Image: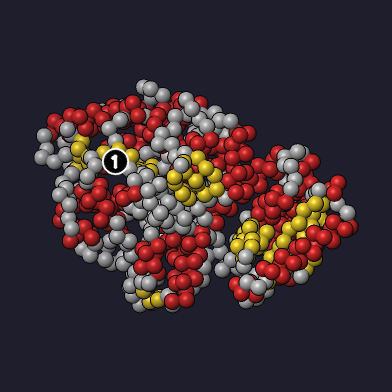
Amino acid sequence: MARVPYGISNFESIRDKEKNYLYVDKTRFLHEVEEINHIIHLRPRRFGKSLFLSMMDCYYDVASADKFDELFRGLYVYDHPTPYRNRYYVLRFNFSGIQNAETDDLKNGFLEKVKTGVQRFIDRYELDIKLRESNSSAVVLNALLNGFEALKLPNKIYILIDEYDHFTNSVLSGDGEAFLKVLKRGGFVRSFYEIIKEYTELGAVERIFITGVMSVTLDSMTSGFNISTNVSTRARFADIMGFTADEVNQVLALPFTTAKSSEQIVTLSEDERAEIFDVFKENYNGYIFSTKSNLKIFNSTLIMYYLSHYIKEGQAPESFVDLNLNQSDSTIENIVELKMPEQNYELIREIIENKEVAGELEPFIDITKKFDQDDVITMLYSIGILTIKSAGFGVVFEIPNKVIQRIYLHYLSNLMQRKAEYRIDMRKQRLAFRELGTSGRVDKLTKIVEDFLMHVSNRNLIDLDEKHVKLMYFILTHATEDFIVYDEFPVGNGYADIFIQKTLTSKAKYEAFIELKYLKRNATTEASIEGKLNEGIAQIESYMKDEGLTNRPGMKKYVIVFSGYEVVKVEEI
């Protein structure tokens, strides 16, 4: 029986037998890790980077040798230990939590993180090293490493750095001047990494493992730290963090308990496991991290979030994403606004409308030089807002899942409302969803679409056509957890315009299937409206031959005809 370790990234705590937490074994990757001395591995947030570093800390720590059996028994590396097990003094830094965009605050925050890591290292190994007070992180680190070298101990240092770029993500906005100021030559970040490089050459530091999200900071500090190997896109490291489908299914098959003891056991039925896996696949999966691999990775933290709630409450959480973890659409906005925002707006529109975009995966991004749409795409990929769909002559990227799609739509909705100087009434939006869920009517929802289209078209923000009408339905429906909207939904031998589907957690009685028809205002006549209506009816009747639709209870079917931004016909079939 296992407890779900949601929000826990301490390996020693997870492996405590009395606490009874499950652990998805990633220790086999330590063999791959040891083939490279200095590693940088980038992944989006919430993919288990901190837990992996915590596991490495326990495994390589010279002072934890007597805990090896307790912590690693039953795991792959227990039966297949590596040559460097419990061989190092582990110096660990965690740069998460430094948020303020003011340069002085960032410098002080970085300094405090370095001081904390250094002092813990001294205390952990009871080292006779004295540090003098300094306002320079490089000076503090140099004093530690110089003192360590003087002790002439038999073991070397393994440096683990978690979220190396977290503190600079908060200044990635506007034109990037604050970001450049932080990372300039001679700045506190480069100086810190120059010290690490110096002591690798001297021999005190033998191995390094660094995690983060984006390569922007990495490129900006390269001249101070050009000894590392970025393994982020290598196929054999694709699933070092996050979960594969096999791992997810293994987790779902476990008997769970909600307490330290095994008094209350929860075993998911086969139907429950299949249903939950479908939720995971649609909302937390889809990430491909190598152009040489088709392996799709699940967001591990969100898997644990959902499971933790389901096991305790016996039902799915109200939201697919914990509000504490939700990735704000402001992240997209900061990237879009970095340089050439108008071109980037169009790029976002292209991604949402086409569900994919072609580009190149840039190994490094230097915003002081070239910064084009490939760099924007790479940054969106790095934060998990895009993923690899296919690779060949260039790379095709796509939106990985429904959770990320909502983030895009929320961003685009806010952007278009700002530009149109118009705000959607959230109360009316909630009432529209309630009407759909309780009676199956789409009148209120369609009225909101109509009003929104009028304002954005009058402001010349879009050239209206059918795809933009569909986009408005898409934008509006992102705001609810009760429905998922699909456009160009595959059905029978065709593709339906819009399918507003109930989510598995929804209490709605109805869902809607909509065939949209569009006429330009100057080409609208009674005959043309009737022609479009009949065309839509024929298409829906054809689609309804699909057993997947005919067997759905509460399915409402509509043909909606627009003339410009105005609705001229709503017909329930």
Amino acid found under the numbered disc labelled 1: Ile
* Horizontal side of residue 81 vs 368, given as left or right: left
The N terminus lies in quadrant: bottom left
The C terminus lies in quadrant: bottom right
Residue 242 coordinates in the image, percent (x, y): 38, 55
| Residue beneath disc 1 | 39
Q: Residue at x 69, y 53 (%)?
A: 470
Badge count? 1
Is residue 81 positioned above or below 35 on the image? below
Q: Quadrant of residue 199?
A: top left
Q: Residues within 10 Å of mark 1 (few under 14, many from 20)?
A: many
Which residue lies most toward the right here? 526
* Front-lying residue, 264 or 392: 392
Q: Residue at x 11, y 38 (%)?
A: 153
Q: Residue at x 63, y 58 (%)?
A: 488
The answer to whether residue 323 is visible is no
Is residue 275 positioned above or below 320 on the image? below
Residue 25 coordinates in the image, percent (x, y): 29, 60
Residue 434 coordinates in the image, percent (x, y): 70, 65
Is residue 255 positioned above or below 173 on the image? below
Colouring of the image: secondary structure
The answer to whether residue 481 is visible is yes
Q: Residue at x 86, y 46 (%)?
A: 522
Secondary structure state at the residue bearing disc 1:
strand
* Front-lying residue, 231 or 503: 231
* Horizontal side of residue 123 vs 559, given as left or right: left
* Horizontal side of residue 65 vs 19, given as left or right: left
